Image (cartoon, rainbow, N blue to C red):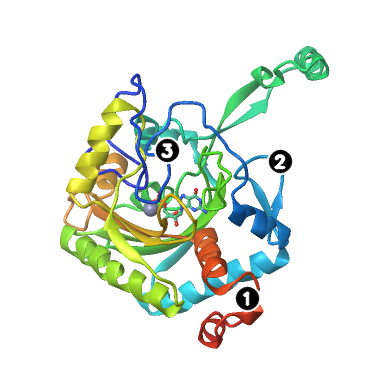
Amino acid sequence: MTAPVDGLGPPVGAEAPPPSGLSPDGREGSAGTAPTVGPASDFLRDLTEAGLLLETGVPGLYGRSARFEALIERIDEFVSRRTAEDGAERLRFPPALPRRELERSGYLEGFPHLAGTVHAFTGDERAHRALLADLEAGRDWTTRQRPTDVALLPAACYPVYPTLAARGPLPERGALVDVASWCFRHEPSREPTRLQFFRMREQVRIGEPEAVRAFRDDWLERGRRLIDELALPCTITTAHDPFFGRGGRMMAASQKEQGLKFELLVPILDGGGPTACLSFNWHRDRFGRTFGLRTARGEPAHSACVGIGLERLALALLRHHGLEPERWPRAVRALLGS
Ligand code: 5GP
Ligand code: ZN
């Protein structure tokens, strides 16, 4: 694997202890140890006390109130308005992908610590009784479950590549896809910016290398304009994904050095640095090769994606303009139609 994508990296040794250090958005640079989850941050407390997020008892897993959801919808519509003229094909997938596609994608080489798979009970009545006995006795009943064919989606764009590959070679102009989904990453945290389930809206460009690179460069500018319009402060920086293991440290350095990932950062939390609200990933021909995705000329296609974290944008707005959207600056309210 040469071009890591959305946390999709080259095969790395997973045997080693994880590197330490913070990634550009202030998260742990890697994992592989049991996550330490501290007390709720002040911002999370503010959000739950304001009734915007609802605690479930599991860090990183929250309910959303009607007011929070209205905000997410308005951000989503704002993105739709700003991308309407691009003429992207709109595709939507469930927050899951065939386990086989996750295995093929290389995600498990780079990010075994973030992946989630769906397990289910497939036993007979005797096995059911054993499961209930385990449950009753407080033993681990989940050993009675088996993995299904389904894995949780780590990034919205993953299903796009095999889907387009199945159509045959791309048209001359390549493809532009608008995709969005709930995503899962096993990163329990008490910071509201780091969720186990969150929504990601993506624009995905697939085709000839020059067109794909131009798309990525263009979006670096467009992303900044979007955030400016929302009256939020931001910086853009080269970034790397939180690869697992000692080998991951090298991969992260190489990803950064080659400029394959950029992040648009907005200060949201009081400590730990600004948070990535948009990510710009250039995969080169990695997905083209992995999924047999070909250009009209028969070459492995290049691809790039821009991922917009909807919850993170909502949190950035709440942080900078206040917890009551009805009192936000008029221009921001007008933009979001609120
Ligand atoms: P990436 O695939 O680059 O890690 O993430 C793409 C985008 O998804 C990020 O720019 C960010 O907006 C969003 N995102 C990534 N991780 C999280 C997370 O833990 N929580 C939330 N709310 N959004 C995330
Ligand atoms: Zn993507």
Image location (x, y in percent) of residue 108: 40, 31
Residue 247 left/right relative to 75: left
Please state which amino acid type lies under the numbered disc 1.
Pro
Question: Is any part of residue 94 visible from this angle?
Answer: no
Between marks 2 and 3, how big is the CA–CA gap? 31 Å
Rendered image: mark on residue 154: none
Image location (x, y in percent) of residue 20: 35, 33
**At 20% across and 41% down in the image, what residue appears?**
254
Question: Of the residues under marks 1 and 2, which one precedes in the sequence?
Answer: 2
Which quadrant of the structure image shows residue 232? bottom left
Examine the rendered structure and indicate whether residue 232 appears above or below residue 116: below
Residue 35 left/right relative to 124: left
Examine the rendered structure and indicate whether residue 318 appears above or below residue 331: above
- Given residues 44 and 94, the one toward you in this image is 44
Instruction: Provide the residue designation for mark 2.
Output: 57
Instruction: Provide the residue designation for mark 3.
Output: 101
Please state which amino acid type lies under the numbered disc 3.
Glu
Q: Secondary structure at mark 2?
A: loop
Query: From the viewer's perspective, is the residue at label 2 or at label 3 nearer?
Result: 2
Residue 80 left/right relative to 212: right
Which quadrant of the structure image shows residue 336? bottom right
Instruction: Provide the residue designation for mark 1.
Output: 325
- Given residues 98 and 327, the one toward you in this image is 327
Examine the rendered structure and indicate whether residue 57 appears above or below residue 229: above
Q: Residues within 10 Å of mark 3 (few under 14, many from 20)?
A: some
Screen quadrant of the N terminus = top left
Q: Secondary structure at mark 3?
A: helix
Question: Of the residues under marks 2 and 3, which one precedes in the sequence?
Answer: 2
Image location (x, y in percent) of residue 335: 51, 83
